[in-house]
Image (cartoon, rainbow, N blue to C red):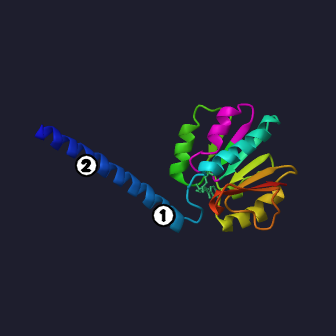
Amino acid sequence: MLSFLTFLAFFLALIGSTVIIVLGIAGAYLIIAGKFMCFSPPVPSSGKTKKAMLEHAAKYLEQHENLTVTDLGSGWGTLLLPLAKHFSSHRFVGYELANLPYYISKLRASRLKNLQFKRQNFFNVNLSNSNIIFCFLLPSAMQECEDKILPQLKQGTLIYANRFPLPNMEPLQTISLGSAYETFYVYRV
Ligand SMILES: C[S@@+](CC[C@H](N)C(=O)[O-])C[C@H]1O[C@@H](n2cnc3c(N)ncnc32)[C@H](O)[C@@H]1O
């Protein structure tokens, strides 16, 4: 009995310390990414905001054909993976510079022919074919998007901006699901 309890205590301690180490590494990665990288950390859209943005975009995708959907800084693939699985007739492209999220999202997308993740700076890409754009970026990058990306986009392109708005463009809709952290903005070019 005593040896079983010793084994159980050892087992729980092992699991506990593994969880702490993994969370520590993930936390340190996010902090370092946020502090020292010149772009926003790979924090995914989540919870109510993610669900509402995906539902909003899904309604548009249902009513149209052959659209190109782009995620500017696609992180772990959180937004494009569920959409690409559901809408096989549309094309989905995510641009991501950070190695770890890029490789993980690429692995997750390996069976989806209509979804591509590219390890590229989205400011160096021609986005004029995009019909829907997602972005969840820092305020400074939203200003840069307004200056460099907006002029490329064709009329009618929908933009979903999670949390941080485009500084000078009037949104078609501001959807607030509670706090400022749960707000997203929908724009039509
Ligand atoms: C806050 S995360 C959002 C991830 C995903 N779009 C979502 O909503 O779940 C922002 C991501 O954009 C990436 N990123 C920022 N600037 C970028 C750039 N210029 N080119 C490519 N990726 C960029 C960051 O590495 C980060 O993973």
Amino acid at circle 2: Ala
Task: Dividing the image into four quarters, tell me where ligand 1 lies.
Answer: bottom right
In the rendered image, the quadrant that contains the C terminus is bottom right
Residue 87 lies in the magenta-colored region: yes
Find numbered disc 2 in the image and state the secondary structure of the residue it sits on.
helix
| Residue 9, image x, y percentages | 21, 45
- Please indicate whether residue 90 sits to the left or right of residue 105 in the image: right
Q: Place residue 10 in its image quadrant.
A: top left
Whether residue 158 is visible here, answered yes or no, is yes
Q: Residue furthest right?
A: 155
Give the position of the N terminus as an image quadrant.
top left
Residue that label 1 marks:
31
Q: Looking at the image, is mark 1 or mark 2 earlier in the sequence? A: 2
Magenta residues?
Answer: 73-92
Q: Is residue 131 left or right of residue 10?
A: right
> Which residue position is annotated with label 2?
13
Q: Residue at x 11, y 40 (%)?
A: 2
Q: Is residue 130 visible?
A: no
Q: Is mark 1 within 8 Å of ligand 1?
A: no
Vertical position of residue 51 compared to residue 186: above or below? above
Instruction: Compare residues 9 and 66 and report the one nearer the observer.
Output: 9
Question: Which quadrant holds residue 66?
Answer: top right
Where is 15 relative to 85, above or below? Answer: below
Q: Position of residue 14 (x, y in %)?
A: 26, 47
Residue 107 spot, x, y in % from top left: 53, 39
* Residue toward you, 29 or 18: 18
